Structure formats: C-alpha cells, structure tokens
Image (cartoon, grey):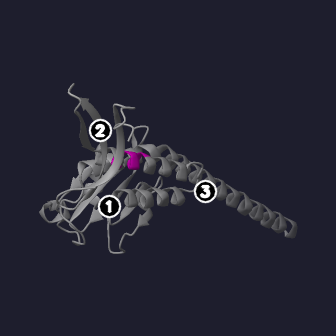
Amino acid sequence: KKLDNGEIDSFSIVKRYKSKNNKIFPAKTNVSLVKNGKNRDYQVAVIEDITKEYKNQSLLKALNLLMSSIMGKTNIKEIAWELVAISANLLQFENSTIYLMDSKTKTLERMAAYKSKKNYSLNLAISNEVLKSGKSQIINNVLKDVRYENDQKTHASEIFIPIIDEGITIGLINSKNTNQGFFTKKHLKTLETIANLAATQLKSAMNLSLLLETNKTNKALVRNLKISNKELNDFAQVV
C-alpha cells in the first residue's frame, strides 16, 4: 500500500513459494516501483531462492547447540553421545558412532552409538588408514571396495571422519547408510567441523578419565600396602 501511495520506492519480504514440482522453498521477494514519466508506474518483483542461506543458518544454529550441550561436560560418554545424536539428526543420518583411542591398548573403543545396529562393526582396514593419515574417507559402494572383502555387508555406503587434537588423531566418527552414494562432500565438511570443534573437549575428558583411573589405582596400591605392612607386623610380633 505504501508503494502504491508513493511513500516508498521498494520493499523486501521473505515468503514460502511452491515450485512447478510442488516443492516448497523459502524465497526473498524484492519489489520495486518503476516510473516511466507518463503517469504510468510499474511494479517489478524479483524472487530470490534463499534455501541455501536458510540451510547455512540452520547448520550454524545446530553447531551452536552442539557446543553449548558439551560445554562444561567432563564425562567422555556424555560428550560422545551429544556429538553422535546432534550430528545424526542435523545431517539426517541413519546412524552415527564415535570411537576413541584407548591409551593403554592403542585400539579404538566405541564410546557412543546413535541408532547403530548391534551387528554393525568397524572396518579395521579403512579406520587404520584414517587414523594414520588423518584424512576423512567416503565409501560410496562397499560392494566395490576390496577392503570390505571379509566384512559382513550390512550397509551400502559409509563415512569415516578423524578426530584430531594438536596434530594427533584421538578417534573417529563413523556412519553407515543402506543407500549407495548417500554421503556427500557437504556431509564430510560438516562432520570435520564438528570433529574439530569437539576434539579439545574430548581430549580433556580423556585426560581427566585417565587421571581419575590412575588415582584410583594408586589408592588401591596404598590400601594393599597398608594391609601387607599390618600382616608383616602381626607376623613379626608372633615370631
């Protein structure tokens, strides 16, 4: 109305539109008043698809939610669970699992699994490559990859993302899908961002867990030593 009355020359509004294939998408509509000097004015509308912008905003909100959910947590399993649950829902994955390196055995230990089936196992050949190289991998078709020769074919595609802290790979994020070619470069980049953001928090929790375990062991040793000393003292008095 203000445009018709000459109070403004243009305005913008965000609305939802339906495409020819009945797909709903968000768009920014820019409407401008055009004057031709003959008392005949025209309105020109330009519609801009902003689906990508909306998705980027949603991603940013999800990442902020993720960081706020793990901030201050010191329990490894709690942190790992937040990571797999939020990332799987964000990217609409069928499942998601986090593995962390055990400092004693030097092997990967499953910390949290979101919607992962019990018969899902980790491909050791590929996971070892990812751990050593520090580079992510997408397997579009497990049937065509020789590294799956001895594996049970429970899925069609898979993604591996290393979790790196100060140049050292401390674990990985893994997801499997029943569709071939499901995982994209965008999935890879998003998971790498999540892994980078969470790496320091996970490493701190791992160090704390190790410290608590060491203190527990030391207390047990001291307790056993006191018992041994008492038994020796009692024996000496008997002798």
Which residue matches tag 2? 31
Labels 2, 3: front one: 2
Along the line of sight, the residue nearer the viewer: 35 or 201 = 35
Name which residue lies at 52% across and 46% down: 201
Name which residue lies at 60% across and 49% down: 72
Question: Residue 75, position in %: x, y?
Answer: 57, 56
Which of disc 2 and disc 1 is earlier in sequence?
2
Looking at the image, residue 121 lies above or below residue 132: below
Name which residue lies at 54% across and 46% down: 204
How many numbered marks are there?
3
Which residue matches tag 1? 175
Q: Is residue 146 left or right of residue 101?
A: left
User: Quadrant location of the N terminus?
Assistant: top left
Looking at the image, residue 156 lies above or below residue 171: below
Question: Residue 18, position in %: x, y?
Answer: 25, 57
Labels 3, 1: front one: 1
Whether residue 151 is visible to the viewer of this picture, yes or no, is yes
Along the line of sight, the residue nearer the viewer: 35 or 21 = 35
Q: Is residue 205 left or right of residue 117?
A: right
Question: Residue 131, position in %: x, y?
Answer: 33, 49
Question: Residue 170, position in %: x, y?
Answer: 42, 48
Q: CA distance from mark 3 to mark 1?
A: 30 Å
- First to last magenta residue range: 55-60
Looking at the image, residue 158 lies above or below residue 72: below
Which of disc 1 and disc 3 is earlier in sequence?
1
Which residue matches tag 3? 213
Secondary structure predominantly adopted by residues drawn in magenta = helix
| 44 inside magenta stretch | no
Whether residue 170 is visible to the viewer of this picture, yes or no, is no
Disc 3 is placed on an element classified as: helix
The amino acid sitting under disc 2 is Val
Q: Is residue 102 left or right of residue 3?
A: right
